[in-house]
Amino acid sequence: MIDTHTHLDDARYNEDREAVITHAQETGVEAFVTIGCDLPTSQAAVALSERYPFVYASVGVHPHEVKHVRDGWYDEFRRLAKNKNVVAYGEIGLDYHYNHSSPKEQRDRFREQVQLAREIALPVIIHTREAQEDTLAILKEERASEVGGVFHCFSGDSRLAKEALELGFYLSFSGILTFQNATPLREIARQTPLDRVLIETDCPYLTPVPYRGKRNEPAYVSQVAKQLAGLHPELSLDDVQRITTVNAKRLFKIA
């Protein structure tokens, strides 16, 4: 399996990061993508990818953090993106639930970052919450389909799924898929073409059943794969693991 969305730089792993990674490998995780949310975490993600040959990185600024963007950040992202381990730009997008950054600021920085991703030819990792219409509009207007990408931790409705797929994007499912109240999401996952599905943990967040209440970690991506396999009686768990791994390698150009 490939855990396509982790935050391995998070301080919650400072005491046992090596053990967490080893545990994940023992459960069948062959590669990890660790995600940048601002400049410091992007730099940390790249540093981790240089330390571990099976860890890949993304760089970018999360919508919560775009108020912190300063002169020179984009040039530094351009520099970081030259590293062969950087496989995506993100996570970027819009989040109108918390509005830690103003909606206008989010939209402006989102546009700029899609433009930058196209410039450096990296697929985008999209975060969207309560901002479906604006997210789709900006992706279309800024021609994001030219580089493609993934709607990470997908939890939207069937219309968002349809439009994302029409743009050529992948849908990545997380531990949310295992939650008791996620019946509509499981139906969307069941209907999503198998060649467009990815799996992730978003660790240390969104711990899946049966580990709710604990810190999430990459090993638990196996629970997402099991849930997905349960939606496809014609497939074995091995099939789901193989298919989602092939998809991740295709999107992120991982050999």
Image (spheres, rainbow, N blue to C red):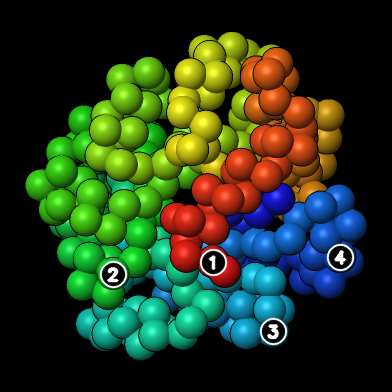
Regarding mark 3 in the picture, which secondary structure is present there?
helix
Q: Disc 1 marks which residue?
A: 254
Q: Which one is in front, 213 or 173? A: 173
Residue type at mark 3 is Arg
Front of the two marks 4 and 2: 2
Q: Residues within 10 Å of mark 2 (few under 14, many from 20)?
A: some
Q: Nearer the viewer, mark 1 or mark 4?
A: 1
- Earlier residue among tags 3 and 2: 3
Give the labeled residue for mark 4: 22
Q: Report which residue position mark 2 lands on.
A: 121
Instruction: Give the alpha-carbon distance from disc 1 to disc 4, as whole Å.
Output: 20 Å
**Alpha carbon of mark 2 to alpha carbon of mark 1: how far?**
15 Å
- Which disc, if any, is residue 19? none
Residue 79, quarter of the rendered image: bottom left
Residue 212 visible: no
Kindly indicate whether the residue at mark 2 contacts the one at mark 4 (C-beta within 8 angstroms): no
Q: Reading the chain from its start, which is encountered first: label 1 or label 3?
A: 3
Give residue 145's position: percent from left, percent from top: 23, 49
Task: Assess whether mark 4 and mark 1 are in contact (beta carbons under 8 angstroms).
Answer: no
Work out whether mark 4 precedes mark 2 in sequence or the reverse, and give the earlier one: 4
Residue at image x 55%, y 19%? Answer: 190
Pick whichever of labels 2 and 1 is earlier in the sequence: 2
Mark 1 vs 4, N-terminal side? 4
Under tag 2, what secondary structure? Answer: loop
Q: What amino acid is at disc 1?
A: Ile
Q: Nearer the viewer, mark 3 or mark 2?
A: 2
For mark 4, give the secondary structure.
helix
Q: Amino acid at mark 4?
A: Thr
User: Within 10 Å of the Cα at label 1, are there few (<14), some (14-19), or many (20+) other Cα atoms?
Assistant: some
- Rendered location of residue 235, percent (x, y): 70, 25
